[in-house]
Amino acid sequence: MTSVSKNQEPFLEIISTHQRIIHKVCRLYAHTEDDRADLFQEILLQLWRAFGSFKGESKISTWMYRVALNTAISGFRKSSRRPATTDLDSTALIAAADAPSSDAEEETQLLYKAIAMLSDLERAIIMLYLEEQSYEEIGEVIGITPNYVGVKINRIKSKLKDILSPHLRETRS
Amino acid sequence: MKLDDLKTLWDSATAPDPNFDRDQLRRLLQNKSSSTIGKIRRNIILEIIFLAVAALAVLAWFAFRSLPVHWGEWVLFTMLFPLSGVLYWYKFRAFVKHDSVSQDLFHSLDTYIQSFDRYLNLYKATMVFLIPVLSIVGIMYGFTLARVEDGKDLTGVPTGVWALLGGVTIVYIFLAMWFSKWYVNKLYGRHLRELKSIRAELEEGQ
């Protein structure tokens, strides 16, 4: 067995266990099936390249979030990866609200559509927050102080509230 | 709407993500990177190979043809191949140290933007330097050859012809430099501006 394949086994073990992290990032930053597949592969390749220098100084999930978000935000340039974000009451939201499905599915779709309207940075922060990462961990991934994480989260929540509130009332009534 | 509603909604996401097994992951690892930097690196390597092959072909042509090599040909060769090779090497080097994907987003972005700026500055410098020099030497060489074929030299060229030649050269240089700047901006301008705005936003939280 070569040293590459020896290293690859523990790497694949980690990815198999934590691949949900990559899927979440792909779902937020790529908006077509093809882009999601491309982004998944790119993140996987970047994780594999960086695996040799991972010394276990942070949690494996923190490291994976870092690599995945860095790849999605800076290294992956696709014109179709982001929908228009100018109109908060966009047709995408209305269409999602009108789609025939269960309330839970509708609300989840609404949440994803609403998050897609945020900036790249805001999406990263709110995803980490929703994934139950602490302010310290979010700060470690993003490179800002925990206090500033709190400030950003409050602003993002308020933005999301503005986007989602009317639609949620409609779907629940 | 309360804060907890968001987390409940997020947790209740019903669309299942695909779950790749190890063999599928192993196969994915054998593919090539589609990142911007990966593509630029591959393009630079291809351009360097093309340049080297073209230089060898031109040297072979110089060696095996019956006519002696004109001074203009040597100047063009020197400008085009060794100097371009050096510039390509520096362009390639601009991204060699880009290994920041494990850093936090702010530092990773900062390194990425610096590398990209270095690359684009080199690209523009290449254009600013090579386009005028190659244009002047190339046009002068072609003009001299045409005169020599007619059995004349450059001493009897009327001033009006020189002025026309100079005008054509200047227009060509400006057009070529404008096009190369427009092309670079079209390729990477928006991407880089977006990244710089994220970095500026992150700087507030340092």
Image: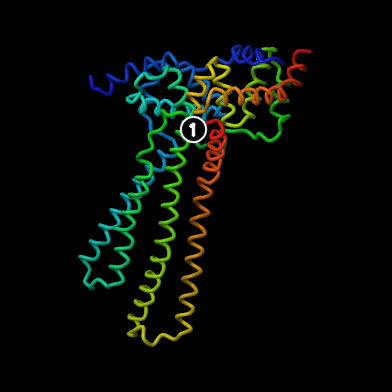
Q: Is residue A28 above or below residue B98?
A: above
A35 horizontally vs B40: left or right: right
Depicted A118 relative to depicted B193: above or below: above
Q: Position of residue A72 (x, y in %)?
A: 50, 30
| Residue furthest to the right | A173
Query: What chain does mark 1 sit on?
Result: B
Which quarter of the figure is the N terminus of chain A placed in?
Answer: top left
Q: Position of residue A83 (x, y in %)?
A: 62, 33
Extreme bottom residue here?
Answer: B156
Colour pattern:
rainbow
Residue that appears at 62% across and 28% down: A116
Crowd around label 1: few <14 · some 14–19 · many ≥20 (10 Å): many
Residue B120: horizontal and vertical position, in percent? 45, 49
Secondary structure found at label 1 = helix
Quadrant of the image containing the C terminus of chain A: top right
Which residue has dot 1 on it? B106
Q: State left or right for residue B140 relative to residue B18.
A: left
Residue A103, picture quadrant: top right
Q: Is residue B180 above or below residue A33?
A: below
